[in-house]
Amino acid sequence: MTERMVTIKNRAGIHARPAALLVQTASKFASKIWLEKGSDKINAKSIMGIITLGASFGTPIRIIAEGTDEEAATAAIEALFESRFEEE
């Protein structure tokens, strides 16, 4: 299992477009991938789960991946957060 902490850097937080990017990226990997905010843990391959997470600017998120390509999966998801979901 691989875990990484990220912080939401884009001002709008995670709305429909970033959620879609997360799902598209997560779906490329065989590993199970979760996003955790506080006590909420959702499947990163579920757009509804991501949107209902209600993650806004400055929110810390834990990326958790488990499987054969978990390192690559966490790195790819982390890169989306670091790039501010290509919005800014």
Image: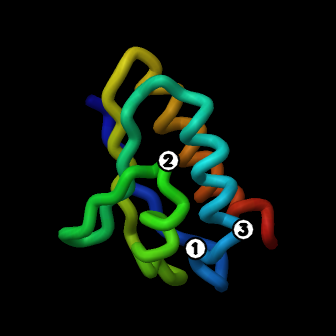
Q: Is residue 51 left or right of residue 2?
A: right
Q: Which picture quadrant has residue 14?
A: bottom right
Quadrant location of the C terminus?
bottom right
Nearer the observer, disc 2 or disc 1?
2
Query: Circle 2 sits on which residue?
Result: 45
Q: Identify the disc placed on residue 17.
A: 3
Amino acid marked by disc 1:
Ile
Total numbered circles = 3
* The one of 16 and 74 positioned closer to us in this rendering: 16
Name the element at disc 1: loop
Rendered residue at 40%/15% (across/down): 68
Whether residue 86 is situated above or below residue 16 in the rendered picture: above
Confirm or deny contact between disc 2 and disc 1 (CB under 8 A).
no
Give how far across and how far down residue 72 sits, in percent: 53, 26
* The one of 6 and 20 positioned closer to us in this rendering: 20
Q: Earlier in the sequence, mark 2 or mark 3?
A: 3
Q: Mark 1 to mark 3: distance in Å?
A: 8 Å
Rendered residue at 40%/73% (across/down): 53
Give how far across and how far down residue 15 sits, in percent: 62, 76
Q: Earlier in the sequence, mark 2 or mark 1?
A: 1
Q: Mark 2 to mark 1: distance in Å?
A: 14 Å
Query: Circle 1 sits on which residue?
Result: 14
Amino acid marked by disc 3:
Arg
Q: Which picture quadrant has residue 36?
A: bottom left
Give how far across and how far down residue 48 sits, in percent: 49, 66
| Crowd band around label 3 with a 10 angstrom C-alpha radius: few (<14), some (14–19), many (20+) | few
| Crowd band around label 2 with a 10 angstrom C-alpha radius: few (<14), some (14–19), many (20+) | many
Amino acid marked by disc 2:
Lys
Q: Identify the disc placed on residue 60.
A: none
Name the element at disc 2: loop
Q: Mark 2 to mark 3: distance in Å?
A: 14 Å
Rendered residue at 61%/31% (across/down): 28
